[in-house]
């Protein structure tokens, strides 16, 4: 209901401003919908497929480094203080 009210308000403002051409109306509607879409995507913090692949590869590399450090730590012996 909130979203439909938003769109109706925007359309009302467009008619008040005197947009007569259907081409102008169409372009304004597309701009409004694109901005709402971008706002929703930003709120959801979505990433693209490419970004996801890059991030998953970086995570995999970091996990491998952590495993290497853990094995090094296990292999080193501590010297007792006298």
Image (spheres, grey):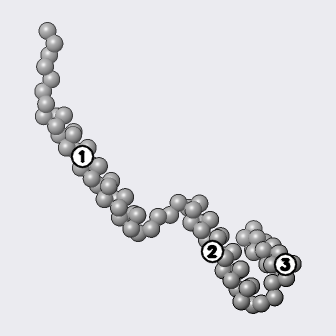
Please provide percent x and percent y for residue 17: 84, 78
Q: Secondary structure at mark 3?
A: helix
Q: How far, Cα to Cα, is label 3 from label 2? A: 21 Å
Mark 3 residue crowding within 10 angstroms, few (<14) / some (14–19) / many (20+): few
Mark 1 residue crowding within 10 angstroms, few (<14) / some (14–19) / many (20+): few
Which mark, residue 16?
Answer: none
Left or right side of 61 for 21: right
Which mark, residue 34?
Answer: 2
Q: Secondary structure at mark 2?
A: helix
Q: Along the line of sight, which residue is nearer the eye, 25 or 49? A: 25
Number of labels in the image equals 3
Up-down: is 23 above or below 30?
Answer: below
Q: Secondary structure at mark 1?
A: helix
Q: Is residue 56 visible?
A: yes
Query: Residue drawn 34% across and 59% down?
Result: 56
Left or right side of 50 for 36: right
Q: Can you say which quadrant of the picture contains the N terminus?
A: bottom right
Query: Residue drawn 62% across and 65% down?
Result: 39
Q: Quadrant of residue 57?
A: bottom left
Please provide percent x and percent y for residue 37: 61, 71
Up-down: is 56 above or below 8?
Answer: above
Q: Can you say which quadrant of the picture contains the C terminus?
A: top left
Counting residues from the start of the chain, the first of labels 2 and 1 encountered is: 2
Left or right side of 45 for 67: left
Q: How far, Cα to Cα, is label 2 from label 1? A: 42 Å
Q: Quadrant of residue 33?
A: bottom right
Q: Which residue is mark 1?
A: 65
Q: Along the line of sight, which residue is nearer the eye, 6 or 18? A: 18
Q: Along the line of sight, which residue is nearer the eye, 56 or 38? A: 38
Q: Which residue is mark 3?
A: 17
Q: Disc 3 vs disc 2: Cβ atoms closer than 8 Å?
A: no
């Amino acid at each position: 209901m909130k979203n439909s009210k938003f769109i109706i308000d925007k359309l009302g403002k467009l008619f008040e401003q005197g947009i007569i051409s259907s081409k102008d109306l169409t372009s304004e509607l597309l701009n409004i919908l694109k901005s709402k879409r971008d706002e929703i995507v930003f709120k959801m913090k979505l990433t693209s497929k490419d970004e996801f692949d890059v991030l998953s590869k970086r995570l995999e590399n970091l996990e491998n480094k952590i495993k290497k450090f853990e094995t090094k730590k296990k292999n080193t012996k501590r010297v007792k203080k006298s």
